[in-house]
Amino acid sequence: MPNISCFSDARVTLLLLGTVALSTTQACDSTVDTEPAAASTTTSPTTSSSMGGTGGTGAGTSAGGNPSVGGSGAGGSTGGGPTTSSTGGTGGTGGSQCTTMNSGDDVCPGPVITIDGSIATQCFVGTTEGKSDDYSSMYCGPNQSNGAESVYQIVVAGTGSLVVQVRAAAGSTLDPTMHARANGECDTGTTYYGCWPFFATHEEFALHSGPDTFYLFIDGANGSSGAYELEIAFTPPACGDKTLNPGEICDDGNTNNNDGCSATCQLEIVTAFDKCPGESAGALLLNQPLVFTSSTTPYADNYRAIAGDKCAQQPPVGAKDRVYQFTAGANGTVTAAVGYDIPKQTDVCSELGLLDPGCWSRVLYAYGASPANPNSCEDTMAGLGPQLACSNETIFGVEEISFPVLAGKKYFVVIDGYSSGYKAYGPFNLHLSLTP
């Protein structure tokens, strides 16, 4: 049986099969610093639109290269006459590639799905409708595993990186939850491998697995049931596959250096902007929001939030953190948020899923300047000044704080993680705005 690692949180407790790397480190794409000591990327949110033609219809259920994304849609229609013509719209998304029916069984042990690497990805269509609520997991939380279940017996015959995803089918009322139990304990449930109850339409996990057998339950939150697609991928272990394999300290989904996680999946330590006074955001002006894109991955653990505001309790231990400072351009209220994409339209975790490197458990808090040094926050964070605001309301979601400011005064915002291990650090977009 694989080792079991734990993630404890007052809001949820998970036991995770093996050494799990559900994107525990930062993404290394164009939105994240490419030089570790460089300042964050700063942008001002903008929107644009154009009058393109109507998008075409998706290409169907069998043309897609990825089971979760159908084939490309046909080209959009062209715009009007010579002076008003415009590019056609983007084609629609095709249907799923999953065509193999396998709904599992209502009770243990369930049908066997063998994972040996001979097929890189297996995809099944199933449903929990017509089944009964026979099993649950104590680690899922209230009402997160009280629907009807489908049971599968997963037999891993090789060694590699295993990724399991479940998605509610189009039109399905299922709010899917996955939980798993150890070999020989399908009915008893003494050893739980984990529970994944985080999102409304999909759940996923990744792990390094050796030869093993375990039981997978596709369940429903809040008593829901319905059709789903179950996708299981198995590949040889490699740095850059978003899974912590033996010998790896981090895995951010690529093999780039100088981004906090090296080309050999070892942590890279950075000191610039790690502690107070942090990176300067300059003057924050009325109704002129700013966005800073960076990551906490290469930084040290220097600070820890205290209970108060939207932090129901102090995080149990510290995590990697990143500090920003700004000067208020006017009296008013500052709102800071992490967990959104750059335009502040999408919750990264809900949209991209738990495996995305940008999805991790964040804590956001703010302090004023030190009484002895108006350009620093070291004293105030050490307890000599009040914490102005704090938020760790969600497990994997948006954290947002608001606090009053005075013109000309400096303030400090800290992006931190909850706990010190599982999904406790990664990339972020820090949104700052000042309103009257």
Image (cartoon, grey):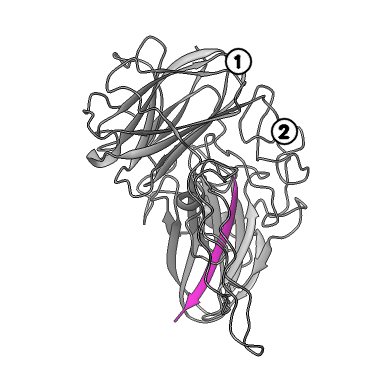
Q: Relative to 131, is 352 above or below?
A: below
- Give the magenta-colored segment's residue range: 426-436
Examine the structure image and report whether residue 430 is included in the region drawn in magenta. yes
- At label 2, the amino acid type is Gln
Of the pair 404 and 355, the residue shown nearer to us: 355
Q: How many marks?
A: 2
Examine the structure image and report whether residue 263 is included in the region drawn in magenta. no
Question: Which residue sits at x=33%, y=50%?
Answer: 171
Check disc 2 and report the residue beneath it. 266
Q: Relative to 288, is 31 above or below?
A: above
Where is residue 30? Give x, y as percent: 70, 56
Where is residue 228? Give x, y as percent: 38, 38
Where is residue 126? Give x, y as percent: 36, 33
Q: Secondary structure at mark 1?
A: loop
Check disc 1 and report the residue beneath it. 158
Categorize mark 2 by other alpha carbons within 10 Å: few (<14), some (14-19), many (20+).
some
Q: Position of 101 compared to 233: left or right?
A: left
Of the pair 347 and 372, the residue shown nearer to us: 347
- At label 1, the amino acid type is Gly
